[in-house]
Amino acid sequence: MFDMTVLKHYSIALPSGLTTDKSKEKFMEMLLWFASAIGLSWFMAYTRASLSTYTLSFTILMVIGSVFQLVSFTGWLVFALIATPLNVASFRKEYITKPLLKMFKGIMPEMSQTEKEAIDAGTTWFDADLFRGNPDWNKLHNFPKPRLSAEEQAFLDGPVEVVCQMTDEWETTHERADLSPEVWQYLKDNKFFAMIIKKKYGGLEFSAYAQSRVLQKLTTVGSTLASTVGVPNSLGPGELLQHYGTKEQQDYYLPRLVNGKEIPCFALTSPEAGSDAGAIPDFGVVCKGEFEGKEVLGMRLTWDKRYITLAPVATVLGLAFKLQDPDGLLGEEKDLGITCALIPTDLEGVKVGRRHFPLNVTFQNGPTQGKDIFVPLDYIIGGPEMAGQGWRMLVECLSVGRAITLPSTSAGGIKTVALATGAYSRIRRQFKLPIGKMEGVEEALARIGGNAYMMDAVTTMSTGAIDLGEKPSVISAIAKYHLTEKMRSCVTDSMDIHGGKGICMGPNNYLARAYQGAPVAITVEGANILTRSMIIYGQGAIRCHPYVLAELEAAGNDNFEEALNNFDHALFGHIGFATSNILRSLWMSLTGSRLVGAPFNDPTKRYYQLMTRFSTNLAMLSDIAMLTLGGDLKRKERISARLGDILSHLYLASATLKRYNDEGRQVEDLPLLQWAVEDSLYEIQKAIDELIANFPNKFVGIALRAIILPFGTWLTKPSDKTDHKVARILQTPSETRNRIGQGQYLKREEGNIVGQLEQTLDDILAAEPIFDKVCQAVNQKLPFYRLNEVADIGLEANAINESEAQLLRKAELGRKAAIDVDDFDSIDLAANKSLFEKIKKSQEHAA
Ligand SMILES: Cc1cc2nc3c(=O)[nH]c(=O)nc-3n(C[C@H](O)[C@H](O)[C@H](O)COP(=O)(O)OP(=O)(O)OC[C@H]3O[C@@H](n4cnc5c(N)ncnc54)[C@H](O)[C@@H]3O)c2cc1C
């Protein structure tokens, strides 16, 4: 039955009591049977087998054990005692599920209506796969790559380029504190504010991907232009009307929004309610009143809003307020809840016009107030039946809009910054070397290059999801948070690389306004600390988890029978899922996840293996956190934030791998992919390590570490070698470099500083060998400046020809423009010029 010499060979000691060969053989059979039982359990759990498959497999194993007289009657009794209650539904529900359901109801975290609506809004997509511990990488790569239609491409090549040419960022931000009237008119005439509006109303009806590309390109010339276009196409009257408006409202407003007759804004935030927008104190009271000479059923509105983008120039105000019906004119409900209405700003008593000054990014933004203003109920978006539906409307629209505007402007900004910084680093020399060749600068350049590659990947994949019909609420929060954060850190890196050139403001500074404006993107559409601490994981855990939402819904179901059935199904699925994730995590830790399958057998293989491992770890950590912390998890924001970080970085890295694949797996792009994915993997490991170290229950923390990080942390940040390769890519013209800046406004023409910088990079690279020729001819190491003089020396020494001399002169002009900064007369910098003149005169007088 069993060859005992094998054991001797491996020096396995047998218990001393086993004296005969027969008893030894029996012992070995028993050992083998137990090993099979453990292996089977492991396999079943690893592959997430159902309870019935589990039971059937073990029954077969028990029968085999009985045939070989290894399983006694007691063994069958124990098996029956475990298997019967689990498999006999009525017994299981009565004696296991019911008490657990009662306990669950007791500890279930309380959820406000606004939280519930926020969680219900939107859909899940590949985020759910990443959350569930076993992502299907082929599914990721099979999602179609988003593409532009001919019409969308023509818009990008036509009107978008024209408005980029027309916009002067210095004039906009410093001299006018607004876009020029010509730019405003051009935007209206060319339907820039109607990208989301359907064709039947005259709008452009662009895909989410096309909108993203437009915003990215506009960001090349400045964030005032991009924000002005972004906001009406994001959450606001246009979006709300199309989804929820009555036919009359749609027919009236949408064509007017398309042709620019109406400028919309959306007013939710008030001084008392910023992040906690559900707590707005602004209110409306349903009552009868006179409107345009007739008595109608309406509401009296009072509001005090601030930070409202486009409010100072808006003609129609999308207003969020809480509607009350104390006299029961609409029904029995007295507090109807958050409601959205469209209020014409020329209505008597509506205050708009004053402006805030958001960090020198001078898009129109300001407060609005109204007191006791009577409007008909027809002003509610969707009419009176949509009273009280405002919050749901907002969160549903936000689940889409948040994935487009801010992620796109952030990605567009950094794509431009990446090229400009790469070019500048190659042009600017110190210590007789281009600064981009210095290792310290390479480190910062690599962060910019790797992130630019990833950020573009994330906007493409997220907008692609929207175009596939998703409303990806978790993904939109991930994209908003991480891309605005990456934008802020990359702009800071770029400022450091530019030194004084970045700091001195003026028409030639292409960086400082982005640096100033970075916190605006961090703050709006869900301030970032809140987004990371609550929204990403808070929504992710409930929406992406395969069983938690079903458990919560069952626990909240007043029909006990139905609740019990649903809870029973979810609970046992959940137990199997959780057990599987623990065993999978341990297995992958012990094997270093090297046995995990990957869709490609190339340098990316390891990334897929590690991401599957971390995805499993996330699923496990999530369950353990929910099980041990229960409702407290909501308040343990730092635990929630770190779980969210794991999910986020899995998503960011997935988008990057998808981009690499969609672009034809270009080997030259590999350093960019490696930088981005390795950075994310490192961040995931850090989040896991910190989470375990800070886990509220220390014993659980120790157990988690033993399962997930038994050999400690091992991943490092991208290597110096990878940094070096990415830095080189940014400084050397190539197809790979072009792909980083794809779609940006880089025309090499007068007035486009970044385009001119691109030209100068080419010129400098072409000038360098000519410069070397001159140095060789005169046997002298000349400094790499005053290249026009170097040209003269070269001509005189007959070392170069006239066209080479011309190239040196051209390179010098570009080089000087690239390194020069602006200077001003004092009066030009004074905001209050008359005060300045007065002081100057009195000083002259005194002198
Ligand atoms: C330039 C600009 C344009 C805007 N445009 C519009 C617009 O068009 N329409 C509109 O309605 N609103 C608009 N807003 C409002 C914007 O969406 C809010 O400012 C934002 O939601 C934050 O509110 P707050 O500034 O009052 O910060 P607060 O809510 O006071 O928050 C302060 C800090 O506390 C953090 N925080 C709050 N709660 C939590 C929590 N539970 N956990 C962890 N951290 C938390 C936040 O993340 C933030 O860091 C705009 C704001 C600005 C600055």
Image (spheres, rainbow, N blue to C red):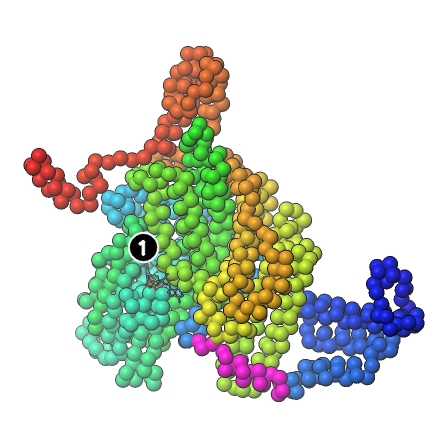
Indicate whether residue 109 is drawn in magenta. Answer: yes
Q: Where is residue 639 drawn, in percent x and y?
A: 49, 65
As displayed, is residue 465 above or below residue 750?
A: below
Q: In which quarter of the image is residue 767?
A: top left
Q: In this view, does 797 lie to the left or right of 378?
A: right
- Give the mark count: 1
Span colored in magenta: 93-111
In percent of width and height, residue 217 lies at 41, 46
Q: Which amino acid does label 1 sit on?
A: Asn
> Whole-percent x and y of residue 138?
63, 56
Classify the position of the C terminus by image quarter. top left
Identify the residue shown where x is 87% and y is 58%.
9
> What's the residue at 66%, 87% (across, down)?
91
Left or right of residue 4, residue 620 in this image: left
Q: In this rendered view, identify the residue nearer to me: 551 or 494.
A: 494
Residue 382: % across, % down: 36, 71
Instruction: Identify whether 157 is placed above or below 67.
Output: above
Query: Under tag 1, what secondary structure?
Result: loop
Of the 4 image quadrants, the one containing the N terminus is bottom right
Say which residue label 1 marks. 259
Q: Is the magenta stretch mostly helix, strand or loop?
A: helix
**Splitting the image into four quadrants, where does ligand 1 fall?**
bottom left
Residue beneath the point at 34% across and 83% down: 333
- Residue count near mark 1 (Cα–Cα under 10 Å), binned few <14, some 14–19, many ≥20: many
